[in-house]
Image (cartoon, coloured by chain):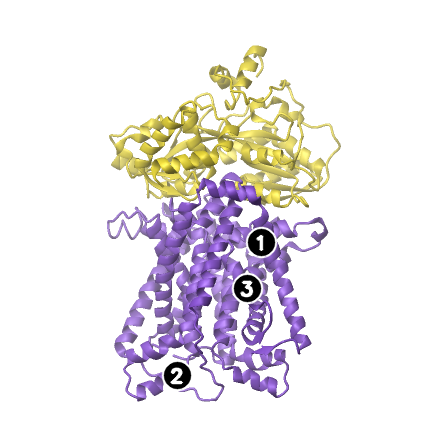
């Protein structure tokens, strides 16, 4: 963000959720300015990496929506940096479950930190006054679009929505079909009965894809529903969980599917015959970290948030989970979509969650499900 | 029917049982029902996103219950009446589907019978899209026939062979005996089996989540609202709809159940062998059970193979790394066994005592307690868990050990299983037996302990076994309760599946199933030696 004029900076923060930072931002930022834009905070170019507060001690309870290996390595690395803290980490893959759990525990909070999962999950808790506002010194470098203005949550990674396909079956059965580079390419009749899509009614990712289509058509819902209807003709299966799409495609049950880019790359790394494509104008999530209000160990919670926002943690997360860091200096994972090359829609998170039920109902009517 | 007011010990026992049920079933569930508030109910119901899942739930319930009960009856008949060989083997096969942790087994069906399934495509060249109603119907039939089988087998085993012998001696053919004696005598068990199976099918979440695809049912919608959108309000409304559905099933059951007496144990000695069934029936039983066994073994075979190869079905090199992963993460497996065993023992005893007080004694509010006892079966597990997390996560209750809370949740979530078995068993024991004991001066509780309990060993065992397997395979009940040190195996499996670690997930699954089978075999062996359990074939 160095070397950016104030004017450019303001424009950039105006675009609601123009993901990412650095060079990419400068290229894509000049776009209309919706009203729900967060206020820009003044970014301090150099943030202190180590906080000046007293060394935290005791037990830290972390609720994590990250994957197993990332959890293990994070606990190890954090303990190395803060030797006085013991970490009790409770993993759960679905962020909505952690969110629900934090809600149900509000009479006697058991968690100090909630890490991972799209910012919507953290934001809802913040609005219910269940989070402790904390502006980490290390968050100063994070783009204002990626954090809550008062510090209720801070974004620290970006997940991008992409397309997974089975390389074996695609090569054999669809040799004369071009690889999709836009979402419209998926309407090709050659894909009929070959695609899997996480059910938007039951999965966050499936809904983000549908909302992405609405934003792609500048909130023209009729055009978006028309697209969804045409796409419906090619979909063999709407799956009950998001991860199942990748499983089915990697088994060759279906040839293509819609899913998170980082999960696709993680599965591919096991040697399964799949690959990732990121069509242009795609959607994304901001992975957040937040502190639970009234948790047992606030001091250690702040230290953990500070640490998560360091370059070291960002690099570790990129390496282990294939997601992108919000810190511009952290290089993306090999094969991962780099933010400067991916075209993202202006994803209006507030609008999407406010209109969720209405859109889903409209979609059900459109596709007759 | 005896009134209880003259026996203080019975009144106290009853008060304690009912008090516990209010504390651990009603109170947590009320927390959930109240979540949406009136406005929440009105606005969610008005959106009508629940209508389709509601009818889908009904549809799959009707289809799967029918096939599961038919299959369960055939299996039970084969086990109790026929002379087919390898019965101990079939007995284990008959409970194997109960031992399947969610997420994993349905995935195995897709690997076998999906569009590129190992059997469907690579053997038969077909590409069936089994995700949807068809696949769900099939998987639910296999997954839930064991409930029907367990309940029906217990009833069949208790039916009096003398009546059948008498009918045969008087000239009735085997088919006539079956139609006019065996079937009518099995009626209470059949009804209990149908009701129980229907409620479990309509409440099940794990299988529809993986195999139903866009065929959304109420539990998957409730779960999706929470996991995908954090919408507890909507999910609570959906859960309440499910509860009402269960209430309807219950009312239907009480109305269908006639006033006929099914007494078949009179207490007088004399166990005559059952009349032999025709050879053709023996052969049919053996073939039907074998086909089912082959299918079930294939499904579990896929899991076993997945646990010992690198990456199934791509890299076939043998490896022990998945089991090494398991042994370095052994705590969840230990927790599962400890919690499950304790919960199952307490649950079976509790349900039996309650069944006795409801079925044999007269007191005010009995029907309500009867309903509360089967209600947990109708509560989606995820809401049972959320209810517990909300109700018992209070500062003044923080001294309660989480492992204990998880065990308590398993006990009360599984009450319906033991309770149904207890009622079905009690209905077949002549009241004159325990009445004789009380006339001779024994208290109600002593009559229960000394006279009825020994005769109810089959029902007690059914309660224990089913509570145990449900406790060790439940995911949704504990997902809001576990802490890092009280993680159970199903939670671990769920996380591994979500992290695309199929090998590790199957290693855990195989171990859970293996240890559970071991426990069951031990229980059967011990109890079989002592009381001659189900030695009726």
Q: CA distance from mark 1 to mark 3?
A: 13 Å
**Disc on res. B373:** 3
| Residue at x-position 37% and y-position 54% | B60
- Mark 2 or mark 3: whose residue is earlier in sequence: 2
Asked whether B102 or B529 is in front, the reply is: B102
Note whether B450 is above or below B213 in the view shown. below
| Residue at x-position 45% and y-position 24% | A344
Residue lying furthest right in this view?
A54
| Label 1 CA crowd tier, 10 Å (few <14, some 14–19, many 20+) | many
| Residue at x-position 35% and y-position 66% | B70
How far across and down, in percent of the image, does residue A192 sit?
Answer: 28, 36
Q: CA distance from mark 2 to mark 3?
A: 32 Å
Badge 1: chain ID? B
- Mark 2 or mark 1: whose residue is earlier in sequence: 1
Chain B: give its colour.
purple
Residue A259 horizontal side relative to residue A19, left or right = left
How far across and down, in percent of the image, does residue B394 sit?
Answer: 68, 49
Q: CA distance from mark 2 to mark 1?
A: 44 Å
| Nearest to viewer (mark 2 / mark 3) | 3
Asked whether B138 or B384 is in front, the reply is: B384
Chain A: give its colour.
yellow
Q: Is disc 3 placed on a helix, strand or loop? A: helix
- Mark 1 or mark 3: whose residue is earlier in sequence: 1
Note whether A236 is above or below B515 in the view shown. above
Residue B310 visible in this rendered orientation of the protein: no
Q: How many marks on residues? A: 3
**Disc on res. B161:** 2
Which residue lies under the disc numbered 1? Answer: B29
Asked whether A174 or A134 is in front, the reply is: A134
């Amino acid at each position: 963000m160095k070397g950016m004029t104030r004017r450019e900076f303001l424009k950039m923060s105006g675009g609601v959720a123009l993901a990412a930072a650095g060079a990419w931002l400068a290229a894509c930022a000049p776009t209309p300015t919706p009203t729900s834009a967060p206020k820009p905070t003044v970014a301090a170019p150099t943030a202190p990496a180590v906080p000046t507060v007293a060394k935290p001690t005791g037990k830290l309870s972390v609720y994590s929506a990250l994957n197993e290996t990332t959890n293990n390595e994070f606990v190890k690395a954090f303990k190395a940096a803060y030797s006085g803290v013991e970490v009790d980490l409770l993993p759960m893959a679905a962020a909505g479950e952690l969110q629900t759990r934090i809600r149900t525990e509000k009479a006697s909070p058991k968690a100090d930190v909630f890490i991972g999962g799209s910012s919507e999950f953290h934001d809802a808790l913040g609005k219910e006054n269940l989070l402790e506002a904390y502006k980490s010194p290390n968050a100063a470098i994070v783009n204002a679009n990626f954090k809550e203005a008062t510090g209720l949550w801070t974004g620290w990674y970006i997940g991008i929505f992409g397309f997974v396909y089975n390389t074996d079956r695609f090569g054999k059965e669809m040799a004369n079909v071009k690889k999709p580079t836009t979402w419209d390419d998926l309407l090709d009749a050659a894909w009929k009965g070959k695609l899997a899509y996480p059910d938007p009614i039951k999965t966050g990712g499936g809904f983000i894809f549908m909302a992405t289509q609405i934003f792609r058509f500048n909130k023209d819902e009729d055009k978006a529903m028309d697209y969804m209807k045409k796409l419906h003709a090619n979909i063999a299966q709407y799956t009950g969980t998001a991860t199942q799409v990748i499983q089915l495609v990697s088994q060759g049950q279906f040839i293509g599917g819609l899913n998170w880019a980082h999960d696709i790359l993680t599965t591919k790394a096991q040697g399964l015959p799949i690959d990732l494509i990121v069509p242009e104008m795609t959607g994304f999530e901001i992975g957040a970290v937040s502190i639970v209000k009234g948790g047992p160990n606030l001091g250690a919670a702040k230290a953990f948030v500070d640490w998560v926002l360091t370059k070291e943690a960002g690099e570790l997360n990129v390496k282990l989970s294939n997601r992108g860091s919000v810190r511009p200096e952290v290089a993306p994972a090999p094969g991962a979509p780099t933010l400067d090359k991916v075209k993202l829609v202006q994803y209006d998170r507030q609008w999407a969650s406010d209109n969720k039920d209405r859109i889903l109902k409209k979609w059900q009517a459109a596709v007759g499900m | 029917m005896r009134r209880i007011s003259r026996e203080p010990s019975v009144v106290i026992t009853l008060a304690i049982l009912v008090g516990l049920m209010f504390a651990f079933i009603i109170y947590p569930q009320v927390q959930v029902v109240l979540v949406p508030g009136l406005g929440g109910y009105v606005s969610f119901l008005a959106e009508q996103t629940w209508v389709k899942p509601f009818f889908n739930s009904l549809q799959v319930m009707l289809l799967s219950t029918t096939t599961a009960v038919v299959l369960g009856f055939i299996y039970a008949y084969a086990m109790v009446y026929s002379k087919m060989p390898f019965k101990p083997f079939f007995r284990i096969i008959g409970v194997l589907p109960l031992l399947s942790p969610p997420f994993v087994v349905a995935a195995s069906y897709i690997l076998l019978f999906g569009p590129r399934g190992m059997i469907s495509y690579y053997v038969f060249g077909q590409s069936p899209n089994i995700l949807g109603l068809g696949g769900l119907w099939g998987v639910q039939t296999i997954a839930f026939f064991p409930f029907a089988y367990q309940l029906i087998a217990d009833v069949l085993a208790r039916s009096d062979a003398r009546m059948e012998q008498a009918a045969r001696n008087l000239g009735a053919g085997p088919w006539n005996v079956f139609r006019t004696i065996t079937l009518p005598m099995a009626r209470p068990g059949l009804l209990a089996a149908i009701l129980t199976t229907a409620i479990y099918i309509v409440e099940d979440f794990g299988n529809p989540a993986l195999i139903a695809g866009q065929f959304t049912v109420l539990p998957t919608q409730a779960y999706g609202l929470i996991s995908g959108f954090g919408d507890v309000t909507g999910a609570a409304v959906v859960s309440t709809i499910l509860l009402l559905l269960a209430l309807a099933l219950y009312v239907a059951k009480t109305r269908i159940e006639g006033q006929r007496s099914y007494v078949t144990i009179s207490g007088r000695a004399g166990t005559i062998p059952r009349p032999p069934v025709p050879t053709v029936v023996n052969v049919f039983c053996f073939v039907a059970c074998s086909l089912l066994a082959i299918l079930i073994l294939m499904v579990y075979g896929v899991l076993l193979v997945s646990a010992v190869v690198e990456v199934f079905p791509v890299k076939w090199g043998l490896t022990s790394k998945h089991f090494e992963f398991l042994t370095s993460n052994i705590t969840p497996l230990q927790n599962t066994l400890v919690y499950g065993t304790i919960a199952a023992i307490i649950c079976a005893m509790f349900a039996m005592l309650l069944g006795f007080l409801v079925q044999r004694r007269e007191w005010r509010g009995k029907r309500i307690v009867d309903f509360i006892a089967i209600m947990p079966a109708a509560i989606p597990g995820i809401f049972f868990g959320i209810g517990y997390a909300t109700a018992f996560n209070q500062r003044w209750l923080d001294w309660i050990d989480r492992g204990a809370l998880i065990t308590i949740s398993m006990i009360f979530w599984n009450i319906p299983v033991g309770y149904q078995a207890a009622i079905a068993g009690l209905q077949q024991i002549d009241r004159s037996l325990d009445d004789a004991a009380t006339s001779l001066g024994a208290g109600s509780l002593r009559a229960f302990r000394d006279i009825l309990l020994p005769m109810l060993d089959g029902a007690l065992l059914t309660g224990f076994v089913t509570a145990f397997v449900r406790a060790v395979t439940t995911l949704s009940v504990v997902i809001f309760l576990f802490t890092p040190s009280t993680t159970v195996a199903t939670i671990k499996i769920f996380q591994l599946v979500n992290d695309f670690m199929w090998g590790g997930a199957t290693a855990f699954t195989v171990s859970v199933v293996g240890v559970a089978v071991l426990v069951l075999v031990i229980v059967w062996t011990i109890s079989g030696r002592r009381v001659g359990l189900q030695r009726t074939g």
